[in-house]
Image (cartoon, grey):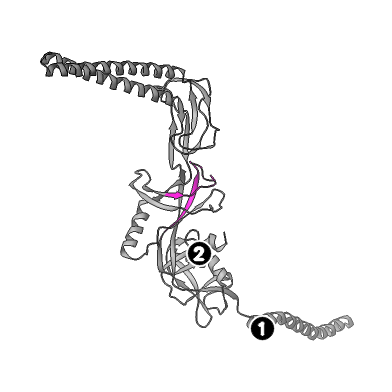
């Protein structure tokens, strides 16, 4: 009985203590949550970077694949037969038109020239005799001593002698020309490739192949390709005035090398081909590029940035500012007048450099979020910070026509 009474007193004493302990624990747990809510309520708006939309002229620069092609190619061939006795050029060197490349044994042709000169002298001697005979018979005919038939025969003999002289002179000139052809000379100026034969080779002019190849590579051609659809659209836009033509005929093509570097010189677009490739639907455009240091070789693969027109009042935003909704529509975050952000659908066109051209959905003066979109949601108040001019230009890279970026870097 005493034990049960003690237990009852302990139970009655512990209940209030347990209630007090639970209340203290609950208060201690609620305090951090209340502090967090207060901190969230007083947190500063997230900082974002934006650009102000404006209309500006944007050169439409297309990056197209291309191949380097020699401006002129000449195959060196022998015009006469004979034994090659000398090679007079360094392989891979520059040669000028008329430089001696190979020497063919001239002895047989020197003999032929001497024979033809002797035949010409013999014909000339016969012509002198025929002329004297014709003059003598002309005098005798005037005195009625010689007959008309004799005089006519003398005139015919003179003309035949003149024809023999002309034939002998032509044979002499041909022999002299063949002797000159034993000196195989460069038909054009340029860089010569490897020698395809050596001294001691016996050539047959009728069946001998190429002795060497000379290519003109300064300036050099770059053949780039563009789809027929793009080219026709460009022409229609230029004709309608939607795009403005580039001023002048200056350099408007920039090459990107295989390592990603920009070639040091700009080129000029010459023309587009009038025939499309039936297999690919591509048209070839030919570019003339300076190549003073020989960095471009025929057959190289390059990419060309071609300025084909100017959109005088284009609106463009950086690529990272454009997002896609679940249904694939393009959207941008816009900072409203009260510094709250909202998603705004836009209609984008082609990519120029690092920016989208916006056809509809934005007006000049609107502020588009470029950086910090991970920290915002629709209707949230933000702290907008405008990008610096340099950062803006970097985000809209590719707006300048080829060569402008190089000038800006002081190259």
Q: Is residue 302 magenta?
A: yes
Q: What span is in magenta?
A: 287-308
Q: Give the residue at the far front of this rendering.
A: 143
Per the image, the residue denoted by label 1 is 38
Q: Image point 12% across, 19% down: which residue?
A: 142
Per the image, the residue denoted by label 2 is 319
Against 26, is 62 above or below?
above
Q: CA distance from mark 2 to mark 1?
A: 38 Å
Residue 330 location, x and y as percent? Answer: 45, 66
Name the element at disc 2: helix
Residue 162 location, x and y as percent? Answer: 25, 21
Q: Image point 53% across, 79% down: which residue?
A: 340
Q: Is residue 215 magenta?
A: no
Q: Residues within 10 Å of mark 2 (few under 14, many from 20)?
A: some
Is residue 171 visible from the viewing direction of this image? yes
Instruction: Say which quadrant the N terminus sits in.
Output: bottom right
Of residues 229 and 37, the one drawn nearer to the viewer in this rendering: 229
Number of numbered discs? 2
Name the element at disc 1: helix
């Amino acid at each position: 009985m005493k034990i049960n009474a003690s237990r009852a007193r302990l139970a009655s004493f512990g209940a209030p203590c347990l209630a007090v302990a639970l209340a203290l624990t609950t208060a201690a747990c609620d305090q951090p949550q209340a502090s967090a809510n207060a901190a969230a309520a007083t947190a500063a708006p997230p900082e974002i970077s934006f650009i102000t939309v404006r209309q500006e002229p944007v050169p439409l620069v297309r990056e197209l694949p291309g191949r380097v092609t020699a401006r002129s190619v000449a195959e060196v061939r022998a015009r006469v037969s004979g034994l090659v006795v000398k090679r007079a050029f360094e392989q891979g060197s520059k040669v000028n038109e008329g430089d001696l490349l190979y020497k063919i044994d001239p002895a047989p042709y020197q003999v032929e020239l001497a024979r033809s000169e002797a035949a010409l002298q013999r014909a000339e001697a016969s012509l002198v005799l025929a002329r004297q005979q014709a003059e003598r018979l002309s005098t005798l005919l005037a005195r009625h001593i010689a007959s008309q038939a004799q005089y006519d025969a003398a005139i015919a003999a003179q003309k035949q002698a003149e024809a023999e002289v002309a034939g002998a002179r032509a044979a002499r000139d041909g022999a002299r020309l063949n002797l000159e052809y034993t000196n195989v000379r460069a038909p054009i100026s340029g860089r010569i490739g490897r020698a395809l034969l050596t001294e001691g080779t016996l050539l047959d002019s009728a069946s001998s192949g190429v002795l060497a190849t000379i290519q003109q590579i300064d300036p050099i051609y770059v053949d780039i390709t563009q789809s027929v659809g793009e080219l026709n659209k460009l022409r229609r836009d230029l004709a309608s005035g939607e795009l403005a033509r580039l001023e002048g005929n200056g350099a408007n093509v920039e090459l990107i090398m295989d390592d990603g570097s920009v070639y040091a010189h700009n080129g000029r677009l010459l023309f587009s081909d009038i025939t499309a490739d039936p297999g690919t639907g591509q048209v070839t455009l030919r570019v003339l590029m300076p190549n003073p240091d020989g960095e471009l070789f025929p057959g190289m693969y390059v990419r060309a940035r071609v300025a084909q027109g100017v959109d005088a009042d284009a609106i463009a935003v950086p690529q990272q500012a454009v997002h896609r909704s679940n249904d694939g529509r393009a959207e941008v975050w816009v900072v409203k007048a009260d510094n709250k952000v909202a998603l705004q659908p836009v209609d984008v066109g082609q990519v120029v450099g690092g920016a989208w051209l916006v056809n509809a959905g934005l007006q000049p003066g609107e502020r588009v979020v470029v950086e910090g979109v991970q920290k915002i949601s629709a209707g949230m108040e933000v702290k907008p910070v405008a990008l610096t001019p340099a950062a803006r230009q970097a985000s809209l890279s590719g707006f300048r026509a080829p060569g402008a970026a190089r000038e800006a870097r002081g190259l």
